[in-house]
Image (tube, rainbow, N blue to C red):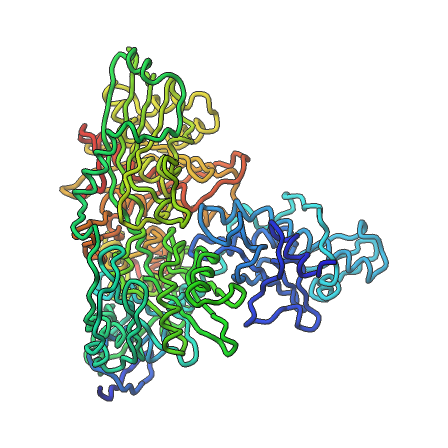
Amino acid sequence: MISRRQFLARSGGLCVALSLPLSSARGLAADLPGGGTLTAYLELQPDGRVRLLSPTSEMGQGTHTGHAVIIADELDVELAVIEVENPEPADAFRRNGSMSSGGSWGMRGWHEPLRKAAAQAREMLMAAAATEWGVERATLDTEPGYVVHAASGRRLAYGELAAAAASLMPPADPPLRDLALARYRGRPAPRVDIPAKVRGEPVFASDVERPGMVYACARLSPVFGAEVAGMDPAGALAVPGVLKVVAIAGGAAVIAEHSYAAIRGADALDIRFAATDHDRLDSATISAQLRAGLEDDSNAIEARREGEIPATLAAADRILEAVYEVPYLAHAPMEPWTCTVEFDAEGDLHLWAPSQAQDRFLKAAAETAGLPENRVHVHTTRLGGGFGRRLGAEGIPGAVMAAREVGRPVKFFWRREDEFGQGWYRPAQVARLRAGLDAEGRITALAIRTAGPSLVSSFFSGGLKAGQLDGTSVQSLRDSRYRAPALMIDWVHVPQPVPMAAWRAVGATQNGFFLECFLDEVARAAGRDPLSVRRELLAHDARALKVLDTAADQAGWGTPLPEGRARGLAYVESYGSLCAQVAEVSRKNDRVIVHKITCALDCGSVIMPDAVRAQVQGGIVQGLSTALHEQIVITGGAASNTNFDSYPILRMPDAPLEIDIILIESGEAMGGVGEPPVPPTAPAIVNALAALSGVPIRQLPLS
Amino acid sequence: MAKIDLRVNGETHTLEADPGMPLLWALRDLLHLRGTKYGCGIAACGACTVHLNGAAVRACMLPLSAAVGAEVTTIEGLGGNHPVQQAWIAEQVPQCGYCQSGQIMQATALLAANPSPSREQIRTGMAGVLCRCGTYLRIEAAIQRAADALRPQDDPA
Ligand code: FES
Ligand code: FES
């Protein structure tokens, strides 16, 4: 016999669960008189309010609202009665064994489980009403917030049925409502998190307050991975307000009554770091090593091969070759790393953190504290930006060590300089691209080799086995829909000591730039239209052609432009969505002016059109920012540009003057939205600039 | 340490603090006004923007001593229903939201100084406040919308 709770967590989630997790601080609606927990995701209050436990973190992508929309339509309630919260990690909230928000899975991964949960809840409410009235379930229907019995005109509010419904088992296979009845999906739904965000009210990690809390500023090694060699806390302790200096992994935490004293104490701390093997590493060396990797045939790992590359190249009318390069990139979320740790009266650890990866955070905290995982409680706050940076838990151990040492709740923070300087970047990478062309200028062979450090081996504890392919290094190349008579993709691993992590769209950003800009080089060399070159490579794929053609048509591809302007095109598929963009640019002295970006996105189907548009706009701005400005410069084994003065990101005057978005609902499997708009932007802009000057641009950033 | 009288959002607070402490940390940690954010600490991102006598300033670089005798307004002091805040909701501007207090404080100061800003003036006037989520086009639209709402009806501009 299993308990109802166990059953709920199983039926609501993806695999076996042992407990139904609910935030202990808030209490269960089920504990309130007349309320009830209907599924792992849904609690119904007696007054009809619905508490939705969303498995995703809200970092501006809008999934909390998206999940509320799914629930409102399927459960049949007003959107306004739904309150969205983040639960603690548990199986019902995990995908592939972990609770996290990445890979643009927020909607495409949770649409079906949440819809099913709402359908279960609705069935349970109707079953409770059927019992109450002594009628058949089949004679009942719902109206928003009510079960109704048309024959007798009777109706019962959901809240009144909550307790009875909560005592029932959720049906295994509830019927889903006809989507034609949906009142919210596909329409503009105002985001639930926005009103608080215009009033300065949301609680980001940096805004968490706990009784008796102190502040800990980290002082960390600027050189990647260097250990502490020694420190003298006297200078730090002399700063008024400083309470204690605690040794933590990779440095120290200076604990004080407020942030300012903690920061001044961190500055005043006399700390020395041990030498490393890479104390003299710089960007030029890395670049030379990566480029040398391109020639390392014996270590190339094959990722894709179609046709006969050597023979096809040998038979080609002409061969084009180019080498491309991109630098390390910082995520630069606007909120530097912060979390708060408190040990409660029972010795359980509570962590308030801006997490994109709750299970990683949970494990890191439990391991550091030496506690079993069930005694660690991860409370997800609002995130002041994520972009993949909050998938990593490297800021957790220091916070736990500081809280344990000081015996009070600790708000632990990194300064902006550490947020930039500690690493976990989008990898630097190079690529060599070769194309064989026939007499008509058609691509007959395409051979692409990328070389660089491995994100997977840096970010995942399991690392990468010798000879194993890091799929992110060839992402959007090995799975590209482009086809040529001969096609070959391989990768050479060139390890570097710089920590890396997933950066919005991951490998698709660099590989999209490489291939899309090279295709324009091919088109120019062959005197062909870049659109027709791509149409040829996609001739077998109606869905991709439609995306490409939609962007081109909407942008007026091929129509005359004012003097000094040019268009550039790029098409990149990632995270299950197809995206084509056309950039229209000019140059004014040193400035690149982006007059317009036209974007066609096929993400299968759209639940929240305005939120999708917002993601496209934001992704394009971020893509443009990387094209124009962004690179981490490494000197002496450390990042040398660690604030916004030396690592500029796009400011408003450089934003595109117009972004025109066409959402295509192909009805194919739902794709991601947060990441796919990013990769095409940089190559579209570079292609437009190259069209303007006739000179290829093979390295980013432009500035 | 010194006794410091600070006027914030129309109230006077007496603080026992280092006069060199940046206003940002006094607002956040001593007065628990958490709407004003830390982003860079070097006046390069605008996340900490507040008003000092109605003008936008970066609180991370402004010592408490420089705020004495002045009227400080933070996002909490805008009232929640300011036309700029309403426009921000209407245009669904925020994504993560972390930069938005600074954006809104910069925008209200901009509109107070120039009720009918051109597109160019909006973009230049907002250049000091970064948004990593990339909400710039919506910010621009929201400022235009707020400017329309704030302009007296009979104003031919
Ligand atoms: S925190 Fe003040 S400008 Fe960045
Ligand atoms: S909304 Fe996220 S930084 Fe601006």
Q: Quadrant of residue B84?
A: bottom left
Question: What residue sits 19% from the left and 65% below the top?
Answer: A272
- Identify the residue shown where x is 47% and y is 70%: A349
Relative to A699, residue A240 above or below: below
x then y, percent, for residue A222: 22, 59
Q: Depth check: A384 or A310 in front? A: A310
The residue lying furthest to the left in this view is A589
A379 left or right of A627 in image = right
Quadrant showing the C terminus of chain A: top left
Residue A547 horizontal/vertical position (percent): 43, 31
Q: A256 or A192, which lies in front?
A: A256
Please provide percent x and percent y for residue A508. 36, 38
Q: What residue appears at the point 35 percent right and 21 percent down from the top-left corner? A: A532
**Up/down of A659 relative to B148, above or below:** above
Quarter assignment of residue A255: bottom left
Quadrant, the N terminus of chain A: bottom right
